[in-house]
Image (cartoon, helix red, strand yellow):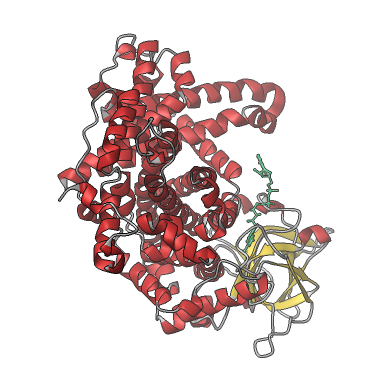
């Protein structure tokens, strides 16, 4: 059958045959540039990259299998449930209060009607929990966050910071939503600096209770999810104060978490001593009821201390297996990294949705063309490819990197291996920061690449952008998290020179730091063949070389500046350098995981597609930072030019299979649901939406 036979026509009989129309739609999708446009396509191709572009044949079904996580079945259950329940779907226009109520109804329905019980998986099978979170977040990101607050934050605090008595008492109520709860860590004056929080929990040995107090306005708990409307409990982070017999009167044992009931179980009235206010309308995530909490001498039983890392006896004696406040604090926060893993993972899913909408629309939309010829698809413009194809490649790269993170996190939850704990901590911080920042920027690019139609709320970019934006801040501000990665790298660097062992993620430093720090080879710096540039060894070496140089140079600078500025001042003097180092390292890890997944992909056609995507990801990143490589002569001028040309060529190649690549994300129409993503039906869907 000729491709032209499949081009939809408004007058065609097929309009009345849904099956034929569906085939047309798919054919457009699978063969993005139909016949009449092929000539134009070739012209554009000739303009950009001579005549080398043979389109790869992609078997979408096989690629879907390569991409599919282990828990697709439960995700499908979520989609089917909400698809069948239109009254539970979030409309485009909805008030804050209605949205909050709808979100609670959605969560209750998920748990009590669809029978999906996420809490059980938080500890037992985190990969399944994150898969549910991803699916639920695609239904409505507010719902994903509401679910995360209930199970990962409030529930996670009870499971991970409490002991058996807490699990026995609270598990079922958290699981079946009888105990909706909050995670109250942030205060008005302290967000990132958790150790600076001022809420206090003072032990009263006479009544065997803790007294929770907000000592000043700056200590009001702020932004607390589930607090404004639905929460009945809060896990409150406060400084534990023990009475002493010296002149000070109390001793500060550091930040601990306490279970505090905040509303009456039956009447839902706010309990005495507690004041709750609404944080109000937000830029996004308005289905989540964020509130502010103030405590005035609120008494709770001693048992409500979540006492896994530190306990207080009946007579007021403190015990802990960990020797210092700092160690206890690190252990406490270390148990909470699951939220970060979930955000990194969910952010990739947002990127998949946005990239799918933008790419499907760009394949369909036609503007301008050579004289007297049909208009061309906007994805044939080199500039549109430049905006969207490296982003598509990055989406694939992040997909595999975050799957790896989830695997490591699950392993860590089982083994509690100390080295793995450190590794997952740094990796989750780095990936969360890197991926969420990238997605946030990409959402604007996707909107822009769909022109004016990208601005219609029904096409989803606005809500995705607004809801996702805060992913860069909560569960750890990205700039702060990247510093943790840099700090960890420096620790590993010192360790290496002491001859100690390095955590798994930093293996490459152990193996070849010296190689990377030697002078670049002037011969290989000039190699420019396609085979060489597409060799994973060249690509990984280039990434690691950059990280090693950044690491060594920042270590030297820190050492120098600390003599005059002290360690805090020196760190601040080198801060941008440190952030670049952290990003560079995370990019290396992402590339490494992508290369591994290309190699292990069992299907040849999918492997070829992934290899193409991988080369584009790697060379685009190298090209973006070409100044650094040129400065140290790692890349000679002729090689830099070759990298640039090849990146454009690869973008063009990826464009040719872009339809198949986004199909392989396997997102149901229900999730992308933007009329402009509906391929050949885009305009009719869209005009219908507007009322024609
Ligand atoms: C919608 C929403 C929901 C939330 N839900 C909850 C919740 O349920 N429970 C809860 O406890 N909290 C919650 N939070 C709070 C959230 O975790 C904090 O906002 C976050 O930790 C950042 O703290 P901050 O807002 O005080 O920012 P700050 O720490 O004041 O940061 C402001 C800016 O300063 C920069 N900065 C800060 N420190 C440094 C540094 N050392 N180096 C360089 N730059 C720095 C940051 O990069 C940032 O750009 C929520 C917040 C929002 C907006």
Of 201 and 367, the residue lying toward us:
367
The residue at the point 49 percent across, 36 percent down is 583
Nearest the eye: 296 or 383:
383
Residue at 62 percent of width and 27 percent of height? 574
Give percent across and percent down for residue 664. Answer: 29, 53
Q: In the picture provided, is 691 more to the left or to the right than 540?
A: right
554 in relation to 241, above or below: above
Point 42% across, 49% down: residue:
361
In this orientation, does residue 400 appear?
yes
Q: Is residue 43 left or right of residue 433?
A: left
Q: Quadrant of residue 261?
A: bottom right
Which residue extends farthest top? Answer: 522
Position of 302 compared to 114: left or right?
A: right
Looking at the image, which residue is at 66% across and 53% down?
194
Q: Using the image, determine if residue 518 lies above or below residue 439.
A: above
Percent across and percent down for residue 38 are 27, 37
Q: Does any portion of residue 595 appear in the rendered image? A: no
Residue 173, position as x, y percentages in the image:
52, 82
- Give coordinates of residue 581: x percent, y percent: 51, 31
Q: Is residue 664 above or below residue 426?
A: below
How many marks do you count on the picture? 0
| Corner quadrant of residue 187 | bottom right
The quadrant in which residue 397 appears is top left
């Amino acid at each position: 059958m000729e491709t032209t036979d499949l081009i939809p026509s408004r007058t065609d009989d097929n309009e009345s045959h849904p099956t034929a129309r569906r085939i047309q739609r798919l054919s457009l999708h699978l063969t993005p540039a139909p016949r009449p446009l092929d000539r134009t396509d070739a012209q554009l191709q000739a303009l950009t990259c001579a005549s080398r572009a043979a389109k790869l044949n992609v078997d979408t079904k096989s690629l879907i299998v390569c991409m599919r996580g282990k828990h697709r079945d439960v995700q499908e259950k979520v989609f089917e449930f909400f698809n069948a329940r239109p009254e539970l779907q979030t409309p485009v226009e909805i008030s804050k209060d209605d949205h909050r109520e709808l979100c609670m109804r959605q969560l209750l329905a998920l748990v009590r009607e669809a029978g999906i019980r996420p809490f059980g998986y938080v500890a037992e099978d985190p990969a399944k929990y994150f898969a549910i979170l991803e699916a639920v977040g695609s239904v409505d990101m507010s719902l994903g966050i509401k679910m995360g607050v209930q199970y990962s934050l409030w529930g996670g605090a009870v499971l991970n910071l409490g002991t058996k008595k807490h699990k026995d008492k609270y598990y079922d109520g958290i699981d079946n939503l009888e105990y909706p709860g909050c995670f109250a860590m942030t205060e008005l004056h302290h967000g990132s600096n958790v150790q600076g929080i001022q809420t206090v929990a003072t032990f009263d040995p006479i009544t065997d209770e803790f007294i929770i107090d907000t000592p000043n306005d700056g200590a009001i708990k702020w932004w607390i999810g589930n607090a404004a409307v639905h929460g009945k409990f809060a896990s409150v982070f406060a400084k534990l104060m023990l009475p002493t017999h010296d002149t000070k009167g109390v001793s500060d044992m550091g930040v601990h978490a306490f279970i505090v009931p905040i509303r009456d179980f039956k009447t839902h009235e706010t309990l005495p001593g507690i004041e709750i206010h609404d944080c109000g309308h937000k830029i996004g995530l308005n289905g989540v009821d964020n509130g502010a909490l103030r405590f005035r001498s609120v008494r709770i039983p001693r048992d409500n201390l979540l006492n896994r890392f530190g306990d207080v006896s009946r007579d007021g004696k403190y015990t802990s297996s960990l020797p210092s406040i700092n160690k206890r604090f690190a252990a406490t926060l270390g148990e909470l990294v699951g939220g970060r893993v979930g955000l990194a993972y969910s952010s990739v899913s947002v990127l998949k949705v946005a990239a799918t909408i933008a790419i499907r629309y760009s394949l369909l939309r036609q503007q301008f063309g050579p004289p007297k010829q049909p208009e061309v698809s906007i994805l044939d413009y080199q500039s549109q490819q430049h905006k969207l194809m490296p982003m598509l490649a990055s989406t694939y790269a992040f997909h595999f990197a975050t799957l790896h993170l989830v695997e490591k996190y699950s392993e860590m939850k089982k083994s509690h291996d100390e080295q793995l704990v450190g590794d997952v901590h740094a990796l989750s911080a780095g990936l969360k920061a890197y991926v969420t920042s990238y997605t946030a920027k990409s959402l604007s690019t996707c909107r822009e690449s769909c022109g004016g139609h990208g601005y219609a709320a029904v096409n989803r970019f606005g809500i995705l952008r607004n809801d996702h934006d805060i992913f860069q801040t909560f569960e750890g501000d990205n700039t702060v998290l990247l510093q943790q990665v840099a700090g960890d790298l420096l620790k590993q660097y010192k360790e290496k020179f002491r001859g100690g062992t390095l955590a798994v993620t930093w293996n490459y430093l152990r193996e070849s730091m010296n190689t990377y720090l030697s002078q670049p080879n002037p011969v290989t710096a000039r190699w420019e063949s396609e085979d060489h540039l597409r060799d994973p060894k060249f690509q990984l070496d280039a990434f690691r070389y950059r990280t090693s140089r950044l690491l060594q140079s920042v270590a030297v600078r820190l050492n120098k500046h600390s003599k005059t500025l002290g360690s805090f001042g020196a760190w601040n003097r080198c801060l941008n350098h440190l952030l670049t180092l952290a990003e560079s390292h995370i990019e290396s890890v992402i590339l490494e995981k992508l290369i591994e997944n290309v190699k292990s992909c069992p299907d040849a056609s999918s492997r070829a597609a992934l290899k193409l995507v991988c080369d584009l990801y790697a060379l685009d990143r190298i090209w973006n930072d070409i100044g650094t490589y040129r400065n140290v002569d790692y890349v000679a001028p002729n090689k830099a030019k070759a990298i640039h040309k090849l990146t454009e060529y690869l973008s063009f190649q990826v464009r040719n299979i872009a339809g198949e690549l986004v199909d392989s994300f396997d997102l149901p129409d229900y999730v992308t649901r933007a009329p402009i993503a509906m391929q050949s039906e885009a305009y009719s869907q869209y005009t219908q939406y507007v009322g024609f």
